[in-house]
Image (cartoon, rainbow, N blue to C red):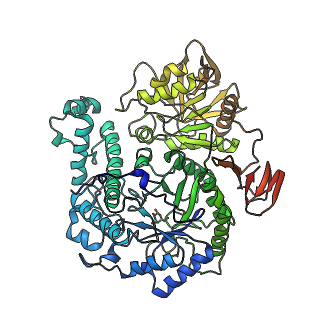
Amino acid sequence: MRRRTAPEGFDPAAVRPWNARIDGLGYGGDYNPEQWPDEVQVEDVRLMDEAGVNLVSVAIFSWATIEPVEGELDWAWLDRTMDRLHDGGVRVALATATASPPPWLTRRHPEILPRLADGTVLHQGGRQAYAPTHPVYRDYALTMAARMAERYGDHPALALWHVDNEIGCHVPRDYSDAAAAAFREWLRARYGTLEALNEAWGTAFWSQRYGSFDDVLPPLAAPTYANPTQQLDFDRFSSDALRDYYRDLRDTLREITPHVPTTTNLMASTGTKGMDYFSWAADLDVVANDHYTIAADDERHVELAFSADLTRGIAGGDPWILMEHSTSAVNWQPRNRPKAPGEMLRNSLSHVARGADSVMFFQWRQSAAGAEKFHSAMVPHGGTDTDVWRDVVTLGRALRALGEVRGSRVRSRAALVFDYEAWWASELDSHPTQAFRYTDQVRAWYGALWKLGVTVDVVHPGGDLAGYDLVVVPTLYLVTDADAANLAAAADRGATVLVTYFSGIVDERDHVRLGGYPGAFRDMLGVRTEEFATLQEGETVRVVGGPLPEGAVADLWTEKTHVAEGTDVVAVYDDGVLAGWPAVTRRGTDGGGAAWYTGARLDEAATTALARAVATEAGVLPEDEPAVGLELVRRHADDGRSWLFAINHGPAEAAVRATGAELLTGEDVDGTLTVPGGAVRVVREG
Ligand code: GAL
């Protein structure tokens, strides 16, 4: 396999900023001119100008157009596209064209096709039919990337490299022979010896002891539960293998164009479990994310906000690129939904409020053929006499008016801890309940803070917590000693830390921390759970005490928890087998902080009440609770300027205290900002 390393003498400081060649905020989308005749492409550039588009992603799925037959390359159309876009003032995030291998490649080399756990081969005919670890595929992909860099590296329209596309989207886990071989290599590197692997995987159980690395396989379809640590390690390996594929492509590009920035579009949200993006971040010159709202989710704007905050967390607080979202309906959900009036603008500016310096869509022009013809676009099937197009033009105008926020950052004193490894491990099979979903718990706490108007950073458990007065830790089932100590240190130096049920249970090998739950957090929280009491569907238990509202209940999960001396019982179970046992506890720390615990999955009202209590204690609750549905976020520039984004997701007019210049309407705001139902306002404060 061809493997690239960063070219000798590569200087990260010499990589130019992704937006060096555009003014203000980026605006545009995926552009697929190969689907259209020339005259449409000419019209495209004219319409891009009308909409204020300045950045498009090109050639994502173009391999088969560039190279329809092995070795026969047709660059003419792409040359024309690049020149035309440049002449029209539009810059390009140019793809490596590797997102889908052409049909001749998979016919000639069927061994590069990926496989499911049950052995099913995933054939060509859709997209992404490749095994990222296969040396033959890797070689072809690197060659393609190198050709793109050689041909367009000096093109004045080139802004950045867009490596592959949503790596791992359709095939986050490949169980092919190539993957198995790479998995064994990865395990050797992680464990060194077979003995260490046997110990970590607990293979004394069920006759699983390995006598040779050659006997180790991915967790293929098996008669019953596969070894949990094998499954967890395969998750880790798969994320690393996909990242390794990205790195090889990036280093190929870097060798040829060392100053052109490189990224790939992540899919950070509550819906994408496959990749540990925190571990990918350092490899991207700028973090880029794709996000789609889920039609069936009534609070999809809150999930969107979480995705944006997670993306910013992955980016370490730096501004990032929203690489894709939709102007209206998508085509891939069970029941799709067009966006309501104003929703597209609200969605776009919520991303900007939370750190995006670019707003892009899939895709520029709605396809007439293919699997995505019913997916909305910036230029819909109906053309320009449509609300979607008018909204696209309006958004372009809004983004130009907001150009000055570019480079500014969100500042937050509250953190929500999020971890992909904990997600993977907590949802493994053979657990106390199969009904637990990590992101349900994350969403519950994120949503409560969102409604209270508390802006949070979404951070890794090992992240720097120094600036946070409130740290919320939703179910962190797996945690390393170092990360647990990091969280305890936050409480010790004065932060309020809240941990929820089924946390601290196992170490990184998925071995239970003995002596009572929540293992790694027992001392910090001053509690000891001796047994979980998971509940049946529809079963609830009353919880009373402290800040909890009348009628509060827990469902799904409760715990039989003892408190240590010095730990206060805040609320108890009021009925059921655990009647009288602690449900919410608090332990003050010498540093003036506190460590709160709840062993229960609390209902929404109780979660909000507890969130309000800890946010109040930490001093992070805003003075005025925002009106229902009003999203308030600030971006700050280093020079002291700040912008208040007020996004009204509700139907009724809402007011908020603000003073300064409103950038979308041009009005002066003196003390009170009024935001009509469904509208967005952005005030440059001061
Ligand atoms: C993304 C993908 C795009 C397009 C879009 C549709 O996953 O990157 O190519 O398929 O979804 O929503």
Q: Is residue 416 left or right of residue 234?
A: right
Q: Which of 225 and 360 lies nearest the eye of the viewer? A: 360
Q: What is the x, y in percent for residue 384?
A: 62, 80
Count of labels in the image: 0
Q: Which of 83 and 352 lies nearest the eye of the viewer? A: 83
Name above or below for residue 606 compared with residue 30. above
Name above or below for residue 219 compared with residue 397. above
In this view, the residue farthest toward the bottom is 39
Q: Quadrant of the N terminus?
A: bottom left
Residue 367 makes an appearance in the image: no
Q: What is the x, y in percent for residue 135?
A: 22, 58
Name above or below for residue 455 compared with residue 45. above
Q: What is the x, y in percent for residue 41?
A: 49, 82
Q: Which of 617 and 650 lies nearest the eye of the viewer? A: 617
Residue visible at 62% across and 43% down in the picture: 411
Q: Is residue 243 left or right of residue 460?
A: left
Name which quarter of the figure residue 360 lies in: bottom right
Name which quarter of the figure residue 385 lies in: bottom right
Residue 19 makes an appearance in the image: yes
Q: Which of 545 and 617 lies nearest the eye of the viewer? A: 617
Residue visible at 25% across and 34% down in the picture: 191
Q: What is the x, y in percent for residue 290?
A: 50, 58
Name which quarter of the figure residue 43 lies in: bottom right
